[in-house]
Amino acid sequence: MFSNILQILRNGELEGQIGSDIGRMVTLARESVIEAGKFFWGQPLTVEDRLKLHGKAEAISDIEHTVRNLMLVHLPLGTSTDRAHFLGLVNLLREIERLGERAKNLVDIARLGRYPLPKDGLVAELETIRDSIERMLIDVPQVLAGPDVKAAQRLTELGRDNMRRCEEVIQGLAASNYAADQAVSLALGSRIYARIQRQLLNLLSSVIIPLHMVDFFEERGADDQAPSSAARRW
């Protein structure tokens, strides 16, 4: 999908460079979320581990700025469609960048939590959601590369269900008898996993809907927003 849009650069060498940079962003984001998840779920966290993950988030941000500046300089923006595609691609890059930020959030929560986590239905449910989202982190780049509309629709339905389940976990925690610190860390973790899922849904929307029509869910209040009207039409 990215390669199709980048063809309007009409510069094969530059298209290849930007495509490679975006691929590196996706890889770093996927690695960061999966690694951070291990610490949230109880793997001991060292200062070096935390600095490494923060470094990956900074690397993702640096690549995003580089790609955006290259596109701003070289992308033809003579028509409203060209400008809409540019802004749409910038929004996609920001969604990838936010995945790195969410990984940092998981690590920060891990520093606050009490371990081991309880072994009960609520925790098992959240861990199942985590497994689903981590598999989606692997599947989504392949769907974007296709692009594969049917796979994007299937993953979107799964993602919406994951977000609903995250909210149910939070509601269950509110009624639980967990210690306050454990309840807070698990609720925050549920919220962050819901936000990771929202970022992935935004990326998938670009396959289902023409890029210039995608209604991206912004970071503020993202978990509480309903799907866009355009996304519901398929």
Image: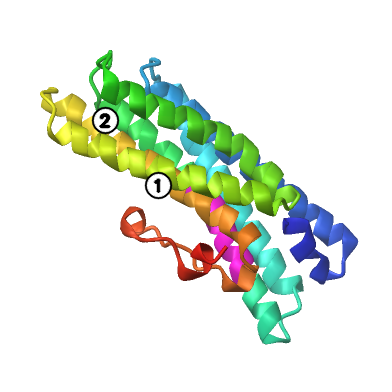
Instruction: Using the image as rendered, state which of residue 128 and residue 153 is in the foreground.
Output: 153
Q: CA distance from mark 2 to mark 1?
A: 14 Å
Q: The residue tagged with tag 2: helix, strand or loop? A: helix
Residue under the image location 31 percent in, 56 percent down: 224
Helix or strand or loop: what does disc 1 sit on?
helix
Q: Earlier in the sequence, mark 2 or mark 1?
A: 2
Q: Position of residue 137 (x, y in %)?
A: 57, 38
Residue extending farthest right: 12
Q: With 171 as the anchor, is 92 left or right in this view? A: right
Residue 29 horizontal side relative to residue 163, left or right: right
Q: Which residue is pictured at 50% across the width and 47% down the height?
A: 157
Kindly tell me whether residue 73 is visible in this rendering. yes
Residue 171 locus on image (x, y percent):
20, 39
Q: Is residue 196 above or below residue 228?
A: above
Examine the rendered structure and indicate whether residue 185 appears above or below residue 82.
Answer: above
Q: Residue at x 32, y 27 (%)?
A: 110
- Note whether residue 50 is visible: no
Q: Which residue is mark 1?
A: 195
Look at the picture and state if 234 lies above or below 144.
below
Magenta segment, principal secondary structure?
Answer: helix
Residue range in magenta is 87-99
Tell me the residue that label 2 is attached to.
186
| Quadrant, the N terminus | bottom right
Residue 116 got which mark?
Answer: none
Q: Residues within 10 Å of mark 1 (few under 14, many from 20)?
A: many
User: Is 89 a magenta residue?
Assistant: yes
- The residue under the point 76% across, 53% down is 19
